[in-house]
Every structure is written in C-alpha cells, then in structure tokens.
Amino acid sequence: MYQALSRIMEGAKHGITNTEIEFGSLQSHSPVSIKLDEDPIPLQQEELVLFKGTVFKPEQVGTRLALLRCTNGQYLVLGEVE
C-alpha cells in the first residue's frame, strides 16, 4: 500500500512541477471560449476543464480569468481575478 501511495505522490509532484498559471479573458459564455494573454487563438470549450457548477453569464464576457495549464494539454479554469 505504501508503494502505491508513493507512486501516486510522485505523479502528483510531477504534475505540479510541469504546470503553469496563465491569464486570459472570457470571449464567449456559451459556448465557453477564453483568449489567453500569450496566445492569439482562443481556447474552445473542449480544451477547458471547469469546476462542477461553473456557469459563465453574458455580463462576465471580458472578465480576466486565471487558468492552470495541465500536462494533458487542457486548461483548468481557476476563476476570475482582478
């Protein structure tokens, strides 16, 4: 059991060290589209991972968001930033 837990922890550490926080702005709320500050091509809904219950509203279009780039190429939307 300890060996299995050790492998899980190593994998988690590897994932954390190979991630990067990025910022972008919400371009569309339905379907969700976010344009990263460093990339001219907006991310589409299939490239994004949202927390359960996350719903963007029309008035949020243009807000600044923090995203976590994952090792699988998707982006986890962390939330709105000022």
Image (cartoon, rainbow, N blue to C red):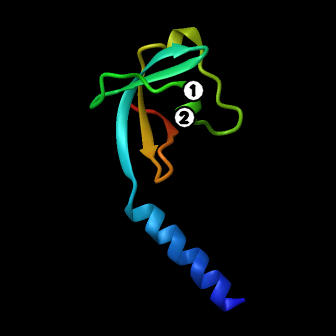
Q: Looking at the image, how many numbered discs can be counted on the residues? A: 2
The label on residue 2 is none
Q: Quadrant of residue 34?
A: top left
Q: Position of residue 14 (x, y in %)?
A: 45, 68
Q: Residue at x 47, y 62 (%)?
A: 15
Q: Quadrant of residue 82?
A: top left
Q: CA distance from mark 2 to mark 1?
A: 5 Å
Q: Residue at x 47, y 50 (%)?
A: 70
Three-letter amino acid code at the position of disc 1: Gln
Crowding around mark 2 (Cα neighbors within 10 Å: few <14, some 14 to 19, many 20+) is some
26 up-or-down from 59: above or below? below
Q: Residue at x 40, y 54 (%)?
A: 19
67 up-or-down from 32: above or below? below
Q: Residue furthest bottom?
A: 2
Q: Quadrant of residue 8?
A: bottom right
Q: Residue at x 36, y 22 (%)?
A: 41
Circle 1 sits in a helix, a strand or a loop, which is it? helix
- Left or right: residue 34 compared with residue 5: left
Three-letter amino acid code at the position of disc 2: Leu
Crowding around mark 1 (Cα neighbors within 10 Å: few <14, some 14 to 19, many 20+) is some
**Are the residues flagged by discs 2 and 1 in contact, CB closer than 8 Å?**
yes
41 up-or-down from 18: above or below? above
Q: In this figure, which residue is indicated by the disc labeled 2? A: 48
Q: In this figure, which residue is indicated by the disc labeled 1? A: 45
Q: Residue furthest left?
A: 38
The N terminus lies in quadrant: bottom right
Q: Position of residue 40 (x, y in %)?
A: 30, 22
Circle 2 sits in a helix, a strand or a loop, which is it? strand
Q: Position of residue 64 (x, y in %)?
A: 39, 25
Q: Position of residue 11 (x, y in %)?
A: 53, 71
